[in-house]
Amino acid sequence: MTALPTRATLAGSADRAPDTGGHGDSDTGTIAGPLRLAVGRLSRRMRQESNDGFSLTQLGVLASLHREGPRTLGALAATEQVAPPTITKAVSVLTDRGLLEKVQDPDDKRVCRVVLSAKGRREVARINSRRDAWLATRLDALDPDDRARLARILPLLQTLADDEMAARTEPVTP
């Protein structure tokens, strides 16, 4: 059985050359890991502040529909990177709670799209408000210079996020 690394072992690994993930630029490798961890932790923390009994998939469905408008179950499954039965269950639960509605596509009656109901739009607004309030409190604890630095890099972070969303929703060709 292999022992898990200790904090001391992990700390010692910082003395080695950074793993650049095959990108050659040591800055890229040095930034990528800590950025991934920080963004992931921040994202999890905000979800914890507002989940109110929603699964991660359900929160993702609500966010996707809020951001992108009516979607098919297949498109939602692709966006959330889950299997179709997982999306079907999440949509069913959210529909039962009155947060979603299913509508026929006006151009193709065979296609069913999922949309946020009025109650769903209010719920998304409430979730976003709670997340924003939690994050604003955290930002208030920073000194003004740190807040200004964060404000300056927001466009870069948005570009990274937008590029990822585009990559996830582009069709995969065999």
Image (cartoon, helix red, strand yellow):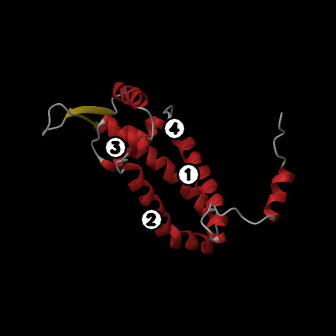
Determine whether the residue tagged by mark 3 lies in a helix, strand or loop.
helix
**Residue in the image at 51% along x and 38% along y:** 51
- Give the camera-side residue of 172 and 112: 172
Discs 2, 1 touching: Cβ within 8 Å = no
Please state which of the two labelled residues, at mark 2 or mark 4, is closer to the viewer: 2
Q: Is residue 145 above or below residue 86?
A: below
N-terminal label among 4 and 3: 4
Name the residue beneath numbered marker 1. Answer: 134
The answer to whether residue 98 is left or right of residue 132 is left
From the viewer's perspective, is residue 107 above or below residue 8?
above
Q: Secondary structure at mark 4?
A: loop
The residue at which mark 2 appears reads as: 159
Q: Classify 10 Å Cα crowding around label 2: few (below 14), some (14-19), many (20 and above).
A: few
> In the rendered structure, which disc, 1 or 4, sits on the residue that comes first in sequence?
4
Q: Which residue is mark 3?
A: 65
Q: As shown in the figure, which amino acid type bears the numbered disc 4? A: Asn
Q: Which mark is residue 51?
A: 4
Tell me how far mark 2 sits from mark 1, CA to CA.
Answer: 24 Å
Rendering quarter of residue 17: bottom right
Q: Are marks 4 and 3 in contact (CB under 8 Å)?
A: no
CA–CA distance in space, label 4 to label 3: 17 Å
Residue 52 badge: none
Mark 2 or 3, nearer chain start? 3
Amino acid identity at mark 1: Trp
x and y, in percent, of residue 171 in the image: 34, 48
